[in-house]
Amino acid sequence: MTYLRRIETLLAQVRSQGRYRTLEAYQVGDAIDFSSNDYLDLSTDPQVVQAFRRASRVGSGGARLLGGRHREHSLLEEELALWLGRERALLFSSGYHAAMGVIPVLAASVDRIYSDRLNHASLIDAMRLAHAPREIYPHAQPPSRERRGANALLVTESIFSMDGDAVDLAAMLGDLGDGDVLLVDEAHALGVVGPAGAGLARGLDDPRVVVMGTLSKSLGAMGGFVAGPAALVELLVNSARPFIFDTALPPSIALAARVALALAQRDESRRERLHAAAAQFRSGLRAMGLPTIASPSPIVPVVLGSPETALRVSAGLLAKRIYAPAIRPPTVPQGGSRLRFSLRSGHTSEHIDLALRELQRCIATL
């Protein structure tokens, strides 16, 4: 059997499990989009777009340690560190690269890694790359310091990307030992919660707390970062392979992200509209008898069970120009297929009422 025949067999298995996906050539044009993580609608803000258009070059020219260093990178890192209340920040070309860079480096300073069961794939892959002893704990139930022993790295998201729930970071910090580290992925919290949108870890003024995040969600740009003690950032510059060997972000992207960061910090009305939209959607789900949790997150899942059911409801909504794609395993656990509604500051009350009405109609036909 040729390798292509084996590939076809593997694809057939994916199809039979309801996990087959297609990569469309373009985004759905005139539909109301509930799939985007552009929570503050900054990716299309005229000031952010204009900053990007002022670029005098396209690529950065190389890795930061070679020809890819530009003033905009350093300025953005300084502004991120100030926003997050950390000594230093370091840019990576994506949030995925940030995870792959920081976790192996932190793992070298501890005896064992402890990871939340629902952590993002980037965190999971980075822990595998670290080749360190690790333990997966039940969601939002980290083992106590007494059970962990000394020198542990705890890895968690602050707001989880599929369920939209938040963890108690203050309690996790209170249970850290002197040799422990808490790595917090703030990807879905930054721009959304905390003072000036600086996330759930903003008030945790402790060098044992390390923050990572992305520029591609609330800031509407591209790239990732790690923020923490200056010594850690220096070690990342010298040891993190996804930083050393990867081409740096284009400086135009860094400039656009700087403008977006300034807007995200000072424009509270965006967050107010975002939270009002999420509250309206959750209230509508409760009125329909569908379960939903109280959360500061704009992520609102509607769990439907099987991949086939999620695909059917998603297709029914799309026929009415409402885009809420089905999320299926392995992104979520077996039996947890869902529609994941991402609310944004640009969603109007009319958008949400229409989505709720059509969702109720689609579910009623199952």
Image (cartoon, rainbow, N blue to C red):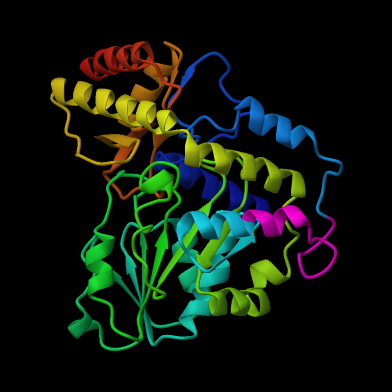
Left or right: residue 50 versus residue 119 is right
Q: Quadrant of the N terminus?
A: bottom right
Query: Which of the pair 299/120 is nearer the observer?
Result: 299
Quadrant location, the C terminus: top left
- Residue 187 placement (x, y as % from top left): 45, 51
Q: How many marks?
A: 0
As for residue 70 lying within the magenta part, the answer is: yes
Residue 118 placed where, x, y %?
A: 33, 57
For the point 65% across and 67% down, which residue is it?
A: 242
Tell me, yes or no, whether the highlighted magenta stretch contains residue 195.
Answer: no
| Residue 247 to residue 161: above or below | below
Q: Quick check: can you spot residue 37?
A: no
Q: Residue at x 67, y 55 (%)?
A: 75
Prevailing secondary structure class for the magenta stretch in the rendered image: loop
Q: Where is residue 102? Give x, y as percent.
A: 53, 71
Residue 141 is left or right of residue 325, and the answer is: left
Which of the pair 24/267 is nearer the observer? Answer: 267
Asked if residue 65 lies left or right of residue 341, the reply is: right
Q: Which residues are magenta?
A: 61-76
Residue 271 lies, in percent from the top left, at 39, 33
Q: Nearer the viewer, residue 155 or 136?
A: 155
Q: Is residue 336 above or below residue 50?
A: below
Identify the residue shown where x is 47% and y is 45%.
Answer: 14
Residue at left offset 59%, top offset 46%: 8
Q: Is residue 146 visible?
A: yes
Judge whether 353 appears above or below 122 on screen: above
